Amino acid sequence: MAESGESVEWSWSDAPIVLPVAFQSREWNAIYIAFYLAEYSGSKVIVTHVLEGEEEEHAFAEQLRREIEALAKELSVRHEYSNVEPQSKPPSVEEIARAIVNTADSNNAQAIVMSAHREGLFRELFGRVSDHVARLSATRVVLVETPQSGLKIPRNPKRIFIPVLKEQHPDPFVIAAALTSSAAVPDAEIIVGKIIELPPTLPLDAIDLSLPLRREEREFSSST
C-alpha cells in the first residue's frame, strides 16, 4: 500500500486482450468491457471462438459480429477473430477452457475478458467454462456476469460501485476508468465500499464508536 500522499498509477499494458465468445446474447457486456479496456490501454482484442461441433451461423451471431465491428470502429480498436478447433467433438468444458487459456498464452495476452452466466444443468454441475478458465489461467481473468438477458451496461455510466473485500486490487479501478474515459465531459460517480466482517460481540449501536473500525475507515479512505 502506498504511503499517505504518495501517488500511485494503476494501468494495463498494451498487450492483447483475449475475448472468448459463443455468440450468445448475454455476452455483450463482456464484449463492451473488453473493447473499452483495449481502447484505454492501446491493446488489440482477439475475439476467440471455440468450435463445439457442426455449427451453423445463426442470425444472432451475424448481428453480434456487426455490433462488434461497429464498436471496434467507434473506439478505433484493433481486433482479430480466432476460431479454435478442439480435438473432441463436442469438446468437454475442460477442453474449451484450456483452448481459451492456450490462446491467451500463445498471444502473450495480458488478460482474458469473458462472460460468466448460468449454463446448462450438466455444466453447472461440473463447473462453468468461465470458472475453469479462471482456475487454469496464469494471467488475469475478468468475468462479467449479466443478471438477465438484455441488460446492458449503459454508455457513459453515471455511477459505478466498486466493492473491496480484503485488499484493494487495481483492476476494478482500471475497468472503471476505462468505462468512463471516453466521455466528452466525464461526470461519473465512482463509489468504493470496503466490506468488513464485524466481530460477533460488537453491538450494532457501537459500530460508530469502535476505534478499530474508525481506524480501518481512515486507512481505507486515505488509500482510496
Image (spheres, rainbow, N blue to C red):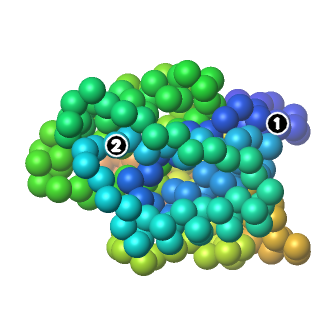
Q: Position of residue 196 (x, y in %)?
A: 46, 48
Label 1, on which residue?
8
Query: Number of marks in the image?
Result: 2
Mark 2 secondary-structure assignment: loop
Is any atom of residue 151 visible in this view? yes
Mark 1 secondary-structure assignment: loop
Q: Is residue 25 above or below residue 22?
A: below
Assess disc 1: are there few (<14), some (14-19) or many (≥20) residues with their C-alpha within 10 Å of its C-alpha.
Answer: few
Looking at the image, tell me whether mark 2 or mark 1 is earlier in sequence order: 1
In the rendered view of the protein, which quadrant contains the N terminus? top right
Point 60% across, 26% down: residue: 107
In this view of the protein, which residue sits in the foreground, 113 or 75? 75
Residue 24, label in figure: none
Q: Is residue 123 left or right of residue 133?
A: left
Point 30% across, 53% down: residue: 55
Q: Is residue 99 above or below residue 61?
A: above
Mark 2 or 1, which is nearer the eye?
2
In this view of the protein, which residue sits in the foreground, 208 or 185? 185
Residue 51, label in figure: 2
